[in-house]
Image (spheres, helix red, strand yellow):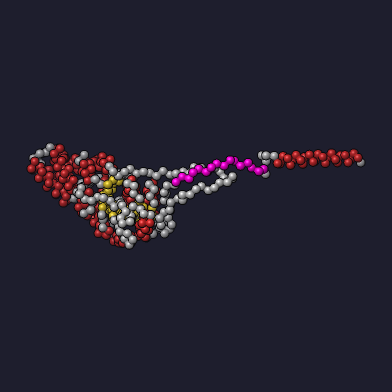
Amino acid sequence: MIDQLWEWLVIAGALAVVLVGLVVGFLRPGRRGRTPTLPPTSTPPPTQPIPAQPTPADPGGGVDTLPPRGTPPETDESDVLLEEPVTPTLERPETAVGRLQRLRARLARSNTALGKGLLALLTRGGLDDAAWEEVEDTLLAADLGIDATNELVEQLRTEVKVHGTSDEATVRGWLRTDLLRLVDPGMNRALASARVDGRPAVVLVVGVNGTGKTTTVGKLARVLVAEDKDVLLGAADTFRAAAADQLETWGARVGVPTVRSHKDGADPAAVAFDAVKAGIELEADVVLLDTAGRLHNKANLMDELGKIKRVVEKQSPIDEVLLVLDATTGQNGLRQAEVFAQVVGITGIVLTKLDGTAKGGIVVAVQRKLGVPVKLVGLGEGPDDLAPFDPEAFVDAILA
């Protein structure tokens, strides 16, 4: 009996030892159920200013809001370390001063037929009627227009007759003077880009399909940003879904907000109205309104353009109406220009693709047709290849 009792005591003692060992092992570090040791926390990085980046507006077409400028949330012991926020770098556009000078080589190459052709004809001596007809043909092929061509040829014939010389330097001087007179450096080519009576300048950009209006508006925004202007874009081309996206992208690259609608088929006049309203509220220097391309012979589309102008003018005058023309269309673009001028009152011309054509005479032709100046020219595909038009640089490039 005593032996059995002793045997039970030994077994009970062994079990107690095993149980204690299990409890101790379970509570040792490294096992599930322990209280974790927290890593040391660090001081959050200082808040960095976030540049203006347009974000989609509300469906009604209001001003795109900018990302909030706040402080990082407070951290507790369970937070991971915060990373330094990524700050997008805004582009700083090239200044517009001297752009046309930089691009003169492209212009000279495209207008070789006009400049070199005329010089070759006028300096070969013995100019008879057939030779003068060749001069006329060269000028007409360059889209100078009939009236301007007749005027220039008559002036050159008089100079040759009076001075009786075919010296290239002398003839080049005559050509420069006469061409510059036709291009008319006295026209006011200043662009409305400053606040007027406490409101922003409003610029409406119009034209037919395919002339590059949206790209031109984006490039024009860069020109103005380079001049330290506060710009706001209005995406009133609501027919092409990609047009507003494209314009918004142009603006985002230089920190310019865009007013747009995310509704399919939204009223372009309403978007334009909202953009001007936002420009007034934000105290912008200038509001650029992009419009859909439209054929000049489609009455309903032209009427809609007139409506945009009327709606905008209910809250602000329109200071500038720029017609974008493709220089490669030549004389075909003049009829388009006439119709747009009748509907919205053109104040200036933007000639795109001028580097891709030998028809530099279109500058003279369109100015004479509309009585308004060429204010800007597009001379390439680069973002800064839009330049204020400089008559003297233009003529010098032709005769280079």
Q: Is residue 37 magenta?
A: yes
Work out whether residue 322 can be spotted.
yes
Can you give x and y, in whole percent of width and height, for residue 287 in the image? Answer: 34, 54
Can you give x and y, in whole percent of width and height, for residue 4 in the image? Answer: 89, 40
Marks counted in the figure total: 0
Q: Residue furthest front?
A: 198
Left of 186 or right of it: where is 320?
right
Q: Residue at x 81, y 39 (%)?
A: 14
Q: Residue at x 25, y 42 (%)?
A: 107
Q: Residue at x 16, y 40 (%)?
A: 172
Q: Residue at x 46, y 51 (%)?
A: 68
Can you give x and y, in whole percent of width and height, for residue 77 in the image? Answer: 59, 44
Q: Main secondary structure of the magenta part?
A: loop
Left of 355 or right of it: where is 58?
right
Left of 45 or right of it: where is 34?
right
Position above or below: 297 against 189: below
- Magenta residues, as a range? 34-49
Q: Residue furthest right?
A: 1
